């Protein structure tokens, strides 16, 4: 289901599709274009889902300049009022009904939205961002004796955007602290221990898991979980189990990798690939000519976006922050 919630009057433009691809989203944009008065600009607030940023969608938006797209920060789609509308229809209709077919479900949703639009109601924020933060601070002081915040995340760029940008509500509320990769020894002991505690043996799969995870905490846990899921009780994980685990993890993160790749410039793609493959001569072309300036700027942009980070132990002087993105670049990325 696609829905455009008018924050001024609460009316909704909706469209039901069986799939959520860029082609369906483009059809929905066309419906919005034909529904909204031609003399008005259209400001769309969307999340960062890759469908909303595909080349086809970007090309359509470029041809319709009255559309202005504003993307919510990653993991912050809750601030978009249409999410409150989805929650409302879920509680009021979907959780209180039973449908024998998809067609019946779609018919009920359409009827519910028609009824909603007969008497639409806009949602109104009752607290400002500052008031919310102040209330949270008071709560933490009561429960913990101090207003300390810990925000954990493996997306360093998002952390810096939240706390280092003066335009953000969380500006200066926390100091981002970049941690080095976790120790392979510590990770290995922890993962092997968890396997043993549940009657399983990580076996020979531990080595490739640690090599692939490269100390990345979230990716290490993702790989360990997938490996645990395919390992039988009282059995040891082997090479076959590891290969299945890696394939599952890469499939789960493929769209994320594609989205990152799509939004990179040509020079940034070249640098990111060179770093993933640990190529020598980062700032030289195959013919030996220098492109130091453009690739240096590309590397700086990738560092700023936290896609790569400095590593003196590699040929390029950098490493890809996300090891699964690096794996995708080496084995699964587009040829162009």
Image: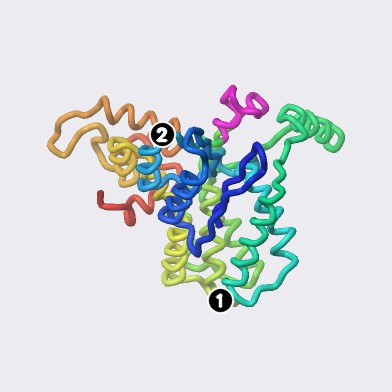
Q: Residue at x 61, y 67 (%)?
A: 107
Q: Quadrant of residue 59?
A: top left
Q: Main secondary structure of the magenta part?
A: loop
Residue furthest right in the image: 142
Q: Nearer the viewer, residue 285 or 261?
A: 261
Q: Is residue 270 visible?
A: yes
Instruction: Name the mark on residue 274.
Output: none
The residues tagged by marks 2 and 1 sit, at their Cα atoms, a distance apart of 56 Å
Task: Kindly identify which residue carries mark 1.
Answer: 232
- How far from the left and from the top, in percent, is residue 22? 42, 53
Q: Name the element at disc 2.
A: loop
Residue toward you, 267 or 217: 267
Instruction: Please tell me whether residue 27 is drawn above or below residue 288 in the rendered image.
Output: below
Q: Which one is nearer the viewer's eye here, 209 or 34?
A: 34
Q: Is residue 211 visible?
A: no
- In this rendering, is residue 248 above or below 217? below
Residue on which disc 2 sits:
65
Answer whether labels 2 and 1 touch (C-beta < 8 Å): no
Magenta region: which residues?
159-176
Q: Is residue 204 above or below residue 29?
A: below
Does the magenta segment cover residue 170? yes
Q: Which colour style is shown?
A: rainbow
């Amino acid at each position: 289901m696609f829905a455009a919630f008018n924050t001024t009057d609460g009316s909704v433009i909706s469209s039901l599709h069986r799939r959520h691809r860029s082609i369906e989203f483009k059809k929905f944009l066309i419906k919005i274009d034909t529904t909204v008065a031609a003399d008005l600009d259209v400001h769309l607030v969307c999340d960062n889902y890759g469908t909303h940023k595909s080349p086809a969608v970007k090309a359509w938006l470029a041809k319709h300049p009255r559309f202005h797209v504003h993307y919510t920060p990653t993991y912050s789609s809750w601030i978009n009022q249409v999410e409150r509308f989805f929650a409302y229809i879920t509680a009021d209709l979907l959780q209180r009904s039973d449908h024998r077919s998809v067609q019946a479900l779609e018919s009920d949703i359409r009827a519910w939205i028609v009824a909603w639009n007969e008497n639409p109601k806009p949602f109104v924020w009752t607290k400002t961002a500052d008031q919310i933060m102040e209330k949270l601070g008071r709560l933490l002081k009561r429960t913990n004796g101090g207003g300390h915040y810990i925000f954990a995340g493996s997306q360093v760029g998002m952390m810096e955007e939240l706390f280092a940008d003066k335009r953000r509500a969380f500006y200066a509320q926390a100091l981002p602290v970049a941690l080095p990769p976790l120790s392979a020894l510590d990770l290995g002991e922890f993962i092997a221990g968890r396997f043993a505690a549940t009657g399983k043996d990580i076996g020979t799969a531990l080595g490739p898991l640690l090599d692939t995870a490269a100390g990345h905490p979230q990716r290490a846990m993702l790989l360990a979980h997938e490996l645990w899921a395919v390992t039988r009780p009282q059995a040891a994980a082997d090479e076959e189990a590891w290969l299945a685990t890696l394939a599952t993890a890469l499939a789960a993160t493929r769209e994320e990798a594609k989205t990152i790749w799509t939004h990179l410039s040509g020079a940034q793609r070249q640098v990111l690939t060179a770093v993933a493959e640990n190529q020598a001569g980062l700032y030289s072309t195959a013919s030996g000519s220098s492109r130091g300036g453009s690739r240096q700027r590309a590397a700086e942009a990738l560092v700023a976006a936290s896609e790569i980070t400095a590593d003196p132990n590699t040929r390029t002087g950098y490493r890809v922050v996300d090891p699964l993105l690096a794996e995708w670049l080496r084995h699964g990325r587009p040829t162009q």
